């Protein structure tokens, strides 16, 4: 889909303004008292022949796989038609029905409480409105594919707006979308913020900097443009003419959410202050920008068009999120925004995290994707024992496939080529998502039986990945140094509060788990002494040492005795093999982005 941002006034007027037929749905949103956190919505439904009208509000925001029940924040619904009030009947948690005269227009009013400041929810206060369409824009199922219009009546103190929605005529406050999907795929930022722009890869990029007045504009422009260039190179095609970054600065930061022609990035106000935090921000830029292809267009069949009423299940978030995570670091290496040595450390710590996580033994990454709605997005103290991150393992599968493809094709055809081919085939050619079988076929074409093995054991199974083998294709040696100096490990995670230490999680099978400790246990004494910092004490011990703990649990003092265990994860050192062959050196350059 193509969208035009509000920043290209003349172009929009020429291309899109005209005698468009009246949209079936037009919304007017206002903020009479923003300190109350309400967005007020007036929805006009054009006259049509139907008598029964069904209206719904999404239960989730695409890109964030959790049922969020947005209708819990909606109240005050009233309807009018032909000058008289109409009864509105709510028949599901997020669905309403009303009966009007055939041929009559309809007007609805309601308001939505918006106080969750995140990239996937809406937030309104005196300073700004940050709006995500799924949280407050009702839809009529029969009109999902029709044009929608939106008029903003900003609060008196707000001066500017940023959104990827095209504007009607030259009025920045009047917007439209070709269908409901496009409408809610374009977040809207309203308030008083600075912005800058840059052109790269033939695309005009606008960056709205909300919540921060001073930032290194020159460096941001330069480095964001570099990321745009290398990301575009992967796919060999730019679907947008305009693209918008909404950057929301806050004290705590908060990640990003991808859209087709824009993204919302939440970061700390201090994000540009140190080289490391600046690099982290660039990683976020790379991640969300890469998504404009991978997941927004090149996507599993379940992820678009969306069902807004329920969970949308896919096995392939390891591809959509994991590969995007693989590339967010790789693009930094390719642009030298991350040094070679740091990138090798990212890889080796990624391998360690996958092989060291208990949950990777019991849940496959395909299952983790399917269950994202109830596990990855609903974590608790047992999550590390039973679940795997499709981000983390998916990123390392990106490395596995990239290395295997380059090795099988003597450096000619890596993961870039598979993604490019799939994007052109499924997104541009067929305009649909790919199936599980088609995804496997894409890899099988070059890897043959190895593709089937990777899918069977590493994606749909829980076999530990042999990272050393894939690293060796690029002349890299992956050495596990854990056995040289085994580290003491107990398996309890502690939280300190005032002068107390509580157990917040336990690794299944660890020493702490075996002797019967539980979460919420409070530490009283270790080997007869009060220890203020258990982890600092543990670092001085050896595997096999005896341990005696006095614990406070629900009003009782209990003593546990056992032995300290051994750190269960590998500790990798990844380095270049001095006698690497010419082919290994070639593969290294393609895989890592630096000369061997
Ligand atoms: Zn992502």
Image: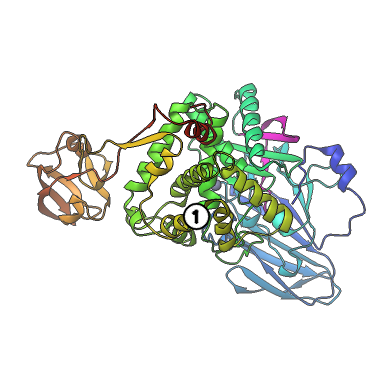
The answer to which image quadrant residue 436 occupies is bottom right
**Tally of numbered tags:** 1
Q: Callout 1: few (<14), some (14-19), or many (20+) C-alpha neighbours within 10 Å? A: some
Q: Is residue 117 visible?
A: no
Q: Taken as a whole, is the magenta stretch helix, strand or loop? A: strand
Coordinates of residue 177 in the picture (x, y in percent) = 77, 53
Question: What residue is shown at x 17% (from left), y 55% (from top)?
Answer: 514
Residue occupying the far left of the picture: 528
Residue 194 lies in the magenta stretch: yes
Q: Which residue is mark 1?
A: 451
Coordinates of residue 362 in the picture (x, y in percent) = 34, 59
Coordinates of residue 462 in the picture (x, y in percent) = 37, 57
The coloring applied to the image is rainbow
Residue 7 lies in the magenta stretch: no
The answer to which image quadrant residue 50 occupies is bottom right
Coordinates of residue 371 in the picture (x, y in percent) = 46, 62
The foreground one among 469 and 375 is 469
Judged from the image, the secondary structure of the residue bearing numbered disc 1 is helix
Residue interval drawn in magenta = 184-210
The foreground one among 80 and 261 is 261
The foreground one among 417 and 580 is 580
**Does mark 1's beta carbon lie closer than 8 Å to ligand 1?**
no
Q: Is residue 528 left or right of residue 105?
A: left
The foreground one among 522 and 340 is 340
Question: What residue is shown at x 15% (from left), y 37% (from top)?
Answer: 531
The answer to which image quadrant residue 459 occupies is bottom left
Q: Is residue 97 left or right of residue 587?
A: right
Q: Is residue 15 visible?
A: yes
Question: What residue is shown at x 11% (from left), y 54% (from top)?
Answer: 558
Question: What residue is shown at x 21% (from left), y 51% (from top)?
Answer: 510
Q: Is residue 226 left or right of residue 392?
A: right
Q: Is residue 420 left or right of residue 396?
A: right
């Amino acid at each position: 889909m193509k969208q035009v941002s509000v920043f290209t006034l003349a172009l929009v007027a020429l291309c899109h303004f005209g005698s468009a037929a009246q949209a079936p749905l037009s919304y007017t949103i206002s903020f009479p008292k923003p300190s109350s956190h309400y967005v007020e919505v007036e929805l006009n439904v054009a006259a049509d022949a139907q008598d029964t009208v069904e209206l719904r509000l999404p239960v989730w925001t695409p890109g964030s796989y959790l049922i969020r029940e947005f209708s819990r924040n909606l109240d005050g619904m009233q309807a009018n038609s032909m000058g008289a009030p109409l009864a509105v009947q709510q028949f599901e948690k997020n669905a309403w029905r009303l009966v009007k005269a055939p041929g009559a227009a309809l007007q609805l009013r309601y308001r939505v409480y918006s106080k969750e400041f995140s990239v996937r929810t809406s937030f309104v206060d005196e300073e700004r409105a940050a709006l995500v369409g799924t949280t407050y824009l009702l839809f009529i199922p029969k009109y999902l594919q029709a044009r929608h219009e939106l008029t903003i009546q900003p609060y008196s103190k707000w001066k500017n707006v940023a959104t990827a929605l095209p504007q009607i005529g030259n009025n920045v406050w009047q917007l439209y979308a070709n269908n409901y999907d496009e409408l809610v795929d374009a977040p809207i930022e309203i308030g008083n913020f600075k912005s800058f722009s840059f052109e790269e890869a033939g695309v005009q990029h606008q960056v709205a900097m909300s919540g921060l007045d001073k930032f290194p504009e020159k460096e941001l422009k330069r480095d964001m443009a570099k990321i745009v260039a290398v990301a575009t190179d992967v796919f060999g095609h730019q679907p947008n003419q305009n693209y918008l970054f909404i950057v929301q600065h806050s004290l705590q930061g908060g990640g990003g959410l991808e859209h087709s022609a824009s993204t919302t990035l939440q970061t700390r106000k201090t994000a540009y202050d140190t080289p490391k935090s600046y690099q982290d921000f660039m990683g976020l830029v790379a991640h969300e920008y890469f998504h404009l292809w991978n997941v927004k267009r090149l996507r599993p069949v379940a992820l678009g068009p969306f069902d807004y009423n329920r969970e949308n299940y896919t096995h392939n978030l390891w591809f959509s999120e994991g590969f995007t995570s693989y590339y967010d670091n790789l693009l930094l290496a390719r642009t030298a925004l991350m040094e070679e040595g740091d990138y090798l450390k990212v890889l080796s710590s990624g391998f360690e995290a996958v092989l060291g996580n208990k949950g990777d033994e019991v849940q496959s990454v395909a299952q983790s994707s399917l269950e994202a709605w109830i596990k990855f997005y609903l974590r608790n103290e047992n999550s590390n024992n039973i679940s795997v991150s499709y981000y983390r393992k998916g990123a390392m599968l990106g490395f596995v496939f990239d290395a295997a493809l380059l090795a099988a094709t003597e450096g000619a055809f890596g993961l870039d080529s598979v993604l490019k081919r799939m994007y052109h085939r499924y997104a541009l050619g067929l305009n649909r998502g790919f199936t599980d079988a088609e995804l496997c076929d894409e890899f099988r074409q070059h890897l043959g039986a190895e593709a089937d093995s990777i899918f069977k054991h590493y994606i749909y199974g829980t076999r530990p990945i042999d990272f050393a083998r894939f690293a060796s294709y690029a002349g890299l040696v992956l050495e596990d140094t854990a056995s040289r100096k085994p580290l003491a490990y107990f398996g309890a995670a502690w939280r300190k509060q005032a002068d107390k230490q509580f157990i917040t999680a336990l690794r299944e099978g660890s020493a702490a788990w075996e002797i019967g400790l539980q979460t919420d246990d409070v530490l009283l004494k270790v080997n007869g002494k009060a220890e203020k910092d258990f982890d600092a004490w543990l670092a001085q011990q050896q595997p096999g040492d005896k341990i005696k703990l006095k614990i406070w649990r629900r009003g009782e003092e209990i003593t546990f005795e056992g032995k300290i265990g051994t750190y269960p994860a590998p500790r990798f050192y990844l380095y270049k093999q001095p006698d690497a062959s010419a082919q290994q050196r070639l593969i290294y350059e393609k895989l890592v982005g630096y000369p061997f």
